[in-house]
Image: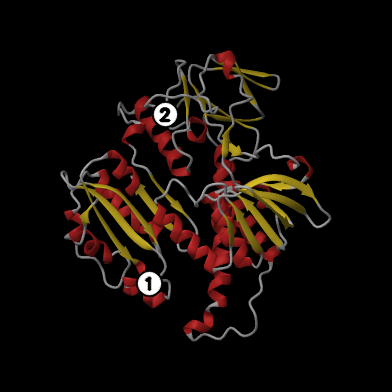
Amino acid sequence: MHEGLKVAVIEKGKLGGTCVNVGCIPTKTLVASARAAHVARRAADFGVNVGGSVTVDMKKVKARKDAISGASNAGVTGWMESLDHGTLIRGHARFVDAKTVQVGDRVLEADRIFINTGARAFVPPIPGVEDVDVLTNVEMMEIDTLPEHLVIVGGSYIALEFAQMYRRFGSKVTVIERSERLVMREDEDVSDAIREILAKEGVDFRLDTQLARLKRTDSGFEAELTQGESTTTLTGTHLLMAVGRLPNTDDLGLDKAGIEIDERGYVKVDDQLRTNVEGVWALGDVNGQGAFTHTSYNDFEIVAANLFDDDPRRVSDRITVYGLFVDPPLGRVGMTEQQVRDSGRPALVGKRMMADIGRAKERSETEGFMKVVVDAETKQILGAAVLGIGGDEIVHGFLEAMSAKAPYTVIQRGVHIHPTVSELIPTMLGGMEELS
């Protein structure tokens, strides 16, 4: 609309998509409430007497979440409805051909069509799953009572955030993960540290375990679990599936437009997010190039730069960066240590424990560590992980240096504020060793 073009936006659900309504904003609001409960329980450690036991009012927790998420949704909706050159159309769009989409009885033609339909939670076809009340991240947003025993299937980002959150609210929590460790895309030391942090808070982990069968019970469900040759049963009151996402491409009529998808259902795009059909782009989760709000927004920036600014920005220029918002959080950028090892390049690695940091000691939040991997020849930073207090913010310092293609010495020689978490980074960079 900024370019003065006439635009139609088609949306069948809530404006703002996953992030605003059932993703980042509401979940991080819940994480904040859970942290408040956790800190209140630890108050005596800081010499603060709150009196009596700490209880959580889940109805108030949900109301706070609804208010914050709802305000974001209302803001986006009001903005979209007031655009001078834009028309908001409610409904489900399907392609008629490469230049035409249909919404109900309405047919629209355009030279430029942008697919941004997002993704949804995947519920695996486990025997008995249709007889049980299965929750995904969407249904979890509607809970206003405390689950007695929340069982979570999956051991990655969404699963772990909900696991710690509801354990802090007061639920018994069990996590079932089929792999031998959590968040398999991370280095083993990161996975192990996250498991230890959550286990210390009382989250029960069943790793290397398959959910084989489900059966409904009066109080919830019974799960049959297999680990190797052994079989056990587990009962729970609430079941959350957090085992991955599916792109919303199966009901768009993409075949009628000739738009190609890959074996997982994601729309195939080139480095500037163009599909194989001229005049059609795919942005956000649906293109498989990133599953985050920040990558989705960057997709928009890439497309707009190419279309309107004569600026040939590309997806391949993007440096991978993301956070895992357990407490303390994980901030991650670039390659993992294992990826660097697999690449075979000569590299340096540095690692320091959060327990060495004054700020962490002062806050009595000494769990976790920071780690960085550097190219031994170019001196450029290849990747970093900061698991600990402020890790999701601190990691951006590495990102900026990587974006500038600056040698690690730029950060190492910087004078960092004391006492902060970031002040340990120059020390870590000054004490790196060869990656063996």
Q: Which residue is mark 2?
A: 3
Q: Amino acid at mark 2?
A: Glu
Q: Looking at this view, is 424 or 308 the one in front? A: 424
Q: Is residue 104 left or right of residue 362?
A: right
Q: Position of residue 153 (x, y in %)?
A: 62, 49
Q: Residue furthest right?
A: 218
Q: Looking at this view, is 429 or 33 the one in front? A: 429
Rendered residue at 31%/41% (across/down): 342
Measured in 3D between alpha carbons, the distance from the residue under mark 2 to the one under mark 1, in whole angstroms, is: 48 Å
Q: Is residue 124 left or right of residue 368?
A: right
Q: Amino acid at mark 1?
A: Ala
Q: Is residue 55 left or right of residue 425?
A: right
Q: Are marks 2 and 1 in contact (CB under 8 Å)?
A: no
Q: Residues within 10 Å of mark 1 (few under 14, many from 20)?
A: many
Report helix, strand or loop for mark 1.
helix
Q: Which residue is mark 1?
A: 360
**Image quarter of residue 126:** top right
Q: Looking at this view, is 330 or 2 the one in front? A: 330
Q: Position of residue 213 (x, y in %)?
A: 72, 44
Rendered residue at 73%/39% (across/down): 127
Report helix, strand or loop for mark 2.
loop
Observer able to see residue 75: no
Rendered position, 152 above or below 259 = below
Q: Position of residue 190 (x, y in %)?
A: 41, 56
Rendered position, 351 above or below 244 = below
Q: How many marks?
A: 2
